[in-house]
Structures are given as structure tokens and as C-alpha cells.
Image (cartoon, grey):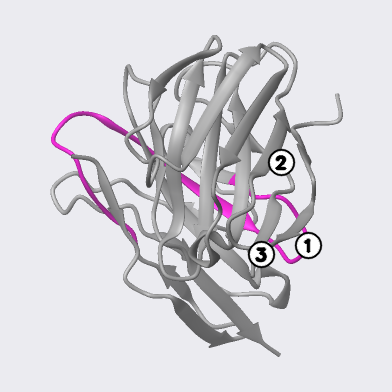
């Protein structure tokens, strides 16, 4: 069965510190991995997807099939990065989109 | 397009009452998802539709929950009878094509007292 695990419910860092939000998945096929973000009083929205291999707002994520991970990283956190982050998984060729439990990132000044 | 529209934004009801949540997906999107958000479980997938047909409802917690999509522009999630443990934020999302970006509504915050 598909499963997405985000081990940290809360991650607190100071502005300028590096950030890594962990995401592990279980699925034996070819996954599509995503990171979604929910800022305060805003809708949940797509941040990035592994297939795009791009950096969005300074965030990057690399799919590691060996470790079944898709950690989200940013070298220097900003206060405006404070939000709820969800890792999501979809199976290539199917429609089902499932999410992890989410990690709240707090960036202090 | 105004995006995915959910109503009501907030709902407070008494235990045992019927609750109906509504969703209007983005026009032209073939997929519609219902999720429940709680602190403990994060975003749980309840059910999703493709071209108005329910594809997977394995996430629906109990028979008290039901969902319909009578046409491409409208879906409902019904809880009957409601219980306090159903209190959560319920999100609707639509996707235009397989494995692409999901667009979410603002959510309905349900409180069952």
C-alpha cells in the first residue's frame, strides 16, 4: 500500500539556518512525489514536484529511490517560510493522491 | 476561474444531525478529491472521483459518510449522523489530468458538539 511518512510534526529554526523537512514513502512502483504548502489563512498549494527538478522559493527536493525519501531542503530559512508543509505521493499511471501527516515549520527572527 | 469553491466555510452542528459539505471543482477538471485534515492524521484521503464516478472510497471512515458527484461541477460529502469525532477541516481538491497539480478549496471547518 502507498504510505507517506513525515516524522516531524514541528520544526523550529532561526532565520538564516538551513532547513530539512523529512519525507519517506513506501511504494514499490514508480512514484510521483510532491510538496504542498499551506501558509496561514491561505489554501493548500503546490510548492514543487520531483519531476520538475526545479527550485521554488529557494526550496529543493531530491527523490532518493534507494532510501525512498523526498526530503525538502532550503539552505537559509526566511520568516515567510513559516507554514505547514505536506509531502504527497501519486503513483505514475494512476490518479490516487495521498498525503503525509504534515510538518509545521516555524522560522524565528 | 475562482478556483475550487467549498461551502459552507464553517459549520457547527449538534451530534446526531446530518451535515452536508459542498464543493465546486475547477471547470474542466476530471478529478475531484475529498480530504479530512486533523492534527493527528494530517490530510486523509476520503474518496475521489474521475469524471463524476467514484474510483476509490476506501478512506471513508464509516457508513455514516457518503459522497456524490451528480455532475462535473458539483460534489457533496454527507455525514449522517454526525459525531464529535468528525470535527475536522474538510478539503475538496480538483486535478485536471493525472499526476498534475491539485487545486484545493478553502476548506470547511466542521465542529460537532
On the picture, is A79 further left or further right than A47? right
Q: Which mark is residue A81?
A: none
Give the residue at mark 2. B105
Q: Is residue B2 left or right of residue B69?
A: right
Quick check: is B97 in the magenta stretch?
no
Residue under numbered circle 1 = A41
- Which residues lie in the magenta part? A23-46
Q: Are marks 3 and 2 on the same chain?
A: yes
Q: Is residue B10 left or right of residue A74?
A: right
> In the image, what residue occupies the spot 66% across and 58% down?
B110
| Callout 1 and callout 3 share a chain | no
> Pointer 3: what residue?
B111
**Hey, which quadrant is residue B78 in on the image?**
top right
**Where is residue A37 drawn, in percent x and y?**
60, 55
Quick check: do tags 2 and 1 share a chain? no
Residue A67 against residue A29 in the figure, above or below: below
Question: Is residue B61 among what the camera can see?
Answer: yes
Local secondary structure at mark 2: loop
Q: Position of residue A74 (x, y in %)?
A: 51, 66
Looking at this view, is A89 or A1 the one in front?
A: A1
Q: Position of residue A17 (x, y in %)?
A: 54, 83
Could you say where residue B112 lies in the image, as x and y percent from the top left?
A: 63, 64
- Local packing at callout 2 (Cα closer than 10 Å; few below 14, some 14-19, many 20+) is many
The reply to whether discs 1 and 3 touch (Cβ–Cβ < 8 Å) is: no
Nearer to us in this view, A63 or B51: B51
| Count of all numbered marks drawn on residues in the image | 3
Q: State which mark lies toward you, 3 or 2.
A: 3
A92 sits to left or right of A101: left
Q: How far apart in space, not on screen, are marks 1 and 3 (Cα)?
A: 18 Å
Amino acid at each position: 500500500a502507498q504510505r507517506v511518512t513525515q516524522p516531524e510534526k514541528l520544526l523550529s529554526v532561526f532565520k538564516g539556518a538551513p532547513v530539512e523537512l523529512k519525507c519517506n514513502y513506501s511504494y514499490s512502483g514508480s512514484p510521483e512525489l510532491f510538496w504542498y504548502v499551506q501558509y496561514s489563512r491561505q489554501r493548500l498549494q503546490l510548492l514543487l514536484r520531483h519531476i520538475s527538478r526545479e527550485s521554488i522559493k529557494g526550496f529543493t527536493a531530491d527523490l532518493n529511490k534507494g532510501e525512498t525519501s523526498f526530503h525538502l531542503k532550503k539552505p537559509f530559512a526566511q520568516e515567510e517560510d513559516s507554514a505547514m508543509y505536506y509531502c504527497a505521493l501519486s503513483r505514475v499511471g494512476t490518479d490516487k493522491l495521498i498525503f503525509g501527516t504534515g510538518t509545521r515549520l516555524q522560522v524565528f527572527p | 476561474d475562482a478556483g475550487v469553491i467549498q461551502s459552507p466555510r464553517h459549520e457547527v452542528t449538534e451530534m446526531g444531525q446530518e451535515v452536508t459539505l459542498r464543493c465546486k471543482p475547477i471547470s474542466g477538471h476530471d478529478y475531484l478529491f475529498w480530504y479530512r485534515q486533523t492534527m493527528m492524521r494530517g490530510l486523509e484521503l476520503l474518496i475521489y472521483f474521475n469524471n463524476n464516478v467514484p474510483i476509490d472510497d476506501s478512506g471513508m471512515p464509516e457508513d455514516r459518510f457518503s459522497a456524490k458527484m451528480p455532475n462535473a461541477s458539483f460534489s457533496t460529502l454527507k455525514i449522517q449522523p454526525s459525531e464529535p469525532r468528525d470535527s475536522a477541516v474538510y478539503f475538496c481538491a480538483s486535478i485536471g489530468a493525472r499526476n498534475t497539480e491539485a487545486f484545493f478549496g478553502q476548506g470547511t471547518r466542521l465542529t460537532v458538539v
